[in-house]
Structure formats: C-alpha cells, structure tokens
Amino acid sequence: MTNTQEPQNTNTSGALAAAKAAAGLKLYDTASHAVSSFTPIKPGQVGIYVCGATVQSSPHIGHIRAAVAFDVVRRWFERLGYKVTFVRNVTDIDDKILDKAAAAGQQWWERAYIYEREFTEAYSKLGVEPPTYEPRATGHMIDMIDLIKKIIDNGHAYVVRDADGNPTGNVYFDVASWPHYGELTHQKQTAVSDAASEVTDAMGPSVDNAGNDKYNPVDPADMSPDKHDPRDFALWKAPKDSDPLDARWNTPFGTGRPGWHIECSAMSHRYLKDMFDIHGGGLDLRFPHHENEMAQTRAAGYDSAARWMHSAWVTAKGEKMSKSLGNGLSVPAVLAEHSAWVVRYALGSVQYRSMLEWSDQTLAEAQSAYDRVANFIERAGAAVGEQPSREEIMAISADALPADFVAAMNDDINVSGASAAIFTAIRSGNTLLSKLADRADSDVAKAEVREALVNVRAMLDTLGLDPLAEPWVSDGAAGGAAGAGADSAEHDALDKLVSEQLAARAEARKAKDFARADAIRDALGAAGIAIEDGPQGSTWSLK
C-alpha cells in the first residue's frame, strides 16, 4: 500500500505577469448560480482539478466532450499568462471495472490499464494537452485512509460494526452532522437561478431531483440498511464476496476499498493543497459526486474549490449520450469516418455549459469550418512567403488578439462568439488577399496579411485548433483520421483537375483571350469551385 512520490508544489513559484485581459475574465460557478469575475487565489497562478475517466471500457464522444471543454478553459488561462497546474484523475478501481473484468475473464487492474491507455490515446488524437498530474486512485490509498480518519475524528462519519463490535469495512459520511450539505446543488435555495442554471437543474441530477436517475444509478453500498440517514454515503466499502483479494485494502475501519467520492477529495488536496481555483467535470457528476466530495473535503478540515464548473452533455436526439442507454459513439468509430480536427471542432463548437447535439449536420459544419480555415492559412502563407513559426504563434498574448475574440473568451469561455471572431478575421484576411495584387505598397500589404494570419492561427491555437500545431501536423493537416486517406486522395485528384483548368485560364489571360478565361472561371464556379486571384497566381476552394 504505497503512494506516488510527493509532487513538487508548482503553486509556490513566483507569481507570473498575467495579461491585462485577465482582469476581464468572468466565469460561471455552479454553487452560486452566477457568472462572476475570476480572481486567482495566488497571483499569476491557477489550480484546476477535473474529474477524469472511470476506465471501465472504451471512451465515447460524451466522455471526451468534457476533456475538450476544460482543455479550452486551460488554454485560455495559459493565453492570459497564468501558470496552470492542471490535475485530471483516473478512477482505476470501481464496481463497474471489477464486474466487467470478471465477465471478460480479465484481471481488474489489467482491464483498467487497457482502457486508461485508450483514453490517453483519444485525448492525444483530439489535441487535449496532457495534465500536469494524472494520478490513479489505486496510487493514493494512504491519502484516502488518512482523509477518512480525519472525517471520523471530526465527528462527521461513522464506522459500521458487527454484532461483536468489530469494524465491517463500511464507513459512511454523516450528512446530518454537516449543515452545509446541499449547497453545491442548491438543496438550500439561497441563489437566484438564471435560464442556464434552470436547464442544468432540470436535466442534471441533484438533491432537488431525487429518485430513479437513469444517468447516475445509486451505488449499491449507499443502499445499505446500516446507514443512519438515507442521505449518508459511503467513504469506505466492505468488499463484495465476488471482489478479488487484490482489490481489498486493510484499514483501521476494516478491509475494503474506497467509495466513489473519496478519491477526488484526497487527490485534489494532495496535488493542489488547500483551496484551489476551479473544480471541473461533467454535468452528471454534479450530484451526488461533487456534492459529496465538497462535503467530505470540508468536513476533513480542508478548503474545497473556490469555483465549480460543469460541462453539459453531448446529446443524440435530445437524449444524453451514454453507453448505458445504448447511444454512445466510440471515439475510434467516429475518427474512422471524420478527421480528428473536425471532431474536436464539433465537440468544442458551443459554450461548455450548453448541451451539444451530435449529428451529421454538426460534423458537416465542422468540416466546412476546416475547409475555410485551411484555405485561408494556405493562401495567406503563400502570399507572404512563409508560415509564422509555432513559437511565434504560442507567444502571442491575449492582449494582442482581436478584441471581439478576447471579449467572447472572457465571457465564461463563449467559444461560439470566439469562433465568430475567427471567421470575421478570416473574411477580412481574404479581402486583403484579394486586393494584394492591386496594392502599390506591396510590402505594407503583405505585412497586413501576415498580421491577419498570425491572429487567426493564435485564436485557433487558443481553442486547440491551429492546423499547423501538433497533433494535426503529424497526422495530416486535418488530423489524420483512419478514413481520411480516401478524402485526401479525392482532394488530390480534384486539385490536379482544377489546377489544369487554372493553368489553361492563366494562358488564356496571358493571350488576352478573356472570353475563354471567363468561360473557364464560370464553369468552375458552376461546379462549386471558388477562384481567388492573387499575386502568386490563382487559388481555389470549395464554395
């Protein structure tokens, strides 16, 4: 029973100089039901803990939406100049893992590791930055046991004993002893709801919406008749008869394994110490997981997160995407048909608190966005004779980005508004490109095009979508889906055919045969090909 090595405390170094734009950041807080100004606990630094995957089976799009959403949040903090410590845990022991491993004839830890690697691969393919720390539950048993001892000593938990007075391994949090219980999910209605919070209250599980919750079934341990109060929840659980011997740990309160919630309290405190800035996760974790986590952390004598943020669901025909409901789309299956860039764009196309309807139209719109982005970046780079380096793009401060983009991102990470700002900049850049040949001050004109190119790529990079960054470069400009080879071949064939027509048009214009040149342009236009004439020659894109 060992713990991982004590991490270096990345929140103790000197404060960094945040961008001036940081002063305008406002974020929603689930506990207050309000958007408010963000002020870091430690100047220049931000600590974020996000609940990661329970690695029981392959990741689906619903899982990855939360990862992408909080990756964008993290990237905006970094663009604002903050030093970010980002922790995302791995739940590698759980009833579902044990049951599914037994059914498949696997060791439970074998199954957990197989699917942990699948999640890691999915994160990587979709451009999600690696966390600062990614702790596993099984590596922090001592931390959890110590935390439970503190809660018991503080009078907020009780050990269940058998008829002989021996501890059974079951330990429950005593909700009645904790008057603050329910504050996160508004059992205590002290805040005025806005339209968005009313939606999440209606669709997300909470103490106000109890009963048979198909999205968040009750832990069997929490159904025990040994509980003093129906609201009490398991901190430590006695093993089931079917549990393997190596899935049990000896403690002062009996042999067993951790309850669902205690690991996040232990690991957030281990890696971020006392109160940290943001605790994030999917909407379905709001209750009971985060409500219970907040209560047990504070009952142990520690501060909880200063702000709680929850990403909404991916829905399919209005229903939450979930393997348990039979409508989950695995990440490998989606990436077999669509490029990773397109999938990431689709997952991040609406603000994190908005429900995202997953459909063919969503993906088609994302593909169209990629075509517009790639076309501009390619043409602008050709016009100025180079592509700005990744180092230059990454060094662009939020203060140097277009004001409409900054305003959108500072408005509770409004990525819809941020995307609109990107395409406004692309339209302006295309206008500059179309006029480049007619500008006498070509050096000045090229500088304007380059500035537009840098701005567009830096804004895209803030959303994790700069096509010239990793992983998109290594996997092909659009992300290298398994099915992208056919698309690439089709594009290459079309490019060859169109390029021949453009060459013929250029020869016609050179010979002053404008009727033929116009006929070629009109024929391409009728086929859905848009032509842009520039100083480097003519380029084409799909309308």
Image: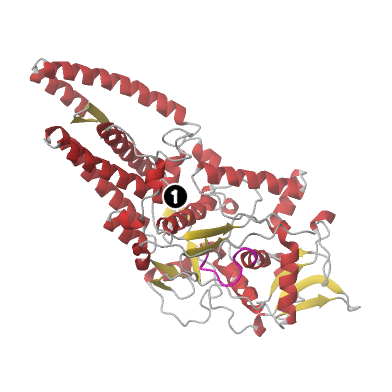
Residue 249's place in the image compared with 62, above or below, is below
Residue 428: x, y in percent? Answer: 21, 45
Residue 354: x, y in percent? Answer: 41, 60
Q: Is residue 32 visible?
A: yes
> Magenta stretch: residue 278 in it?
yes
Residue 478's place in the image compared with 89, above or below, is above
Residue 475: x, y in percent? Answer: 48, 34
Q: Is residue 180 left or right of residue 503?
A: right
Rendering quarter of residue 411 = bottom left
Rendering quarter of residue 269 = bottom right
Residue 214's place in the image compared with 357, above or below, is below
Mark 1, residue position: 347
Q: Is residue 358 visible?
A: no
Q: Which residues are magenta?
A: 270-280
The amino acid type of the residue labelled 1 equals Leu
**Crowd rating for badge 1 (residues with CA inside 10 Å; few <14, some 14–19, many 20+):** many
The quadrant in which the N terminus is found is bottom right
Helix, strand or loop at mark 1: helix
Rendering quarter of residue 356 = bottom left
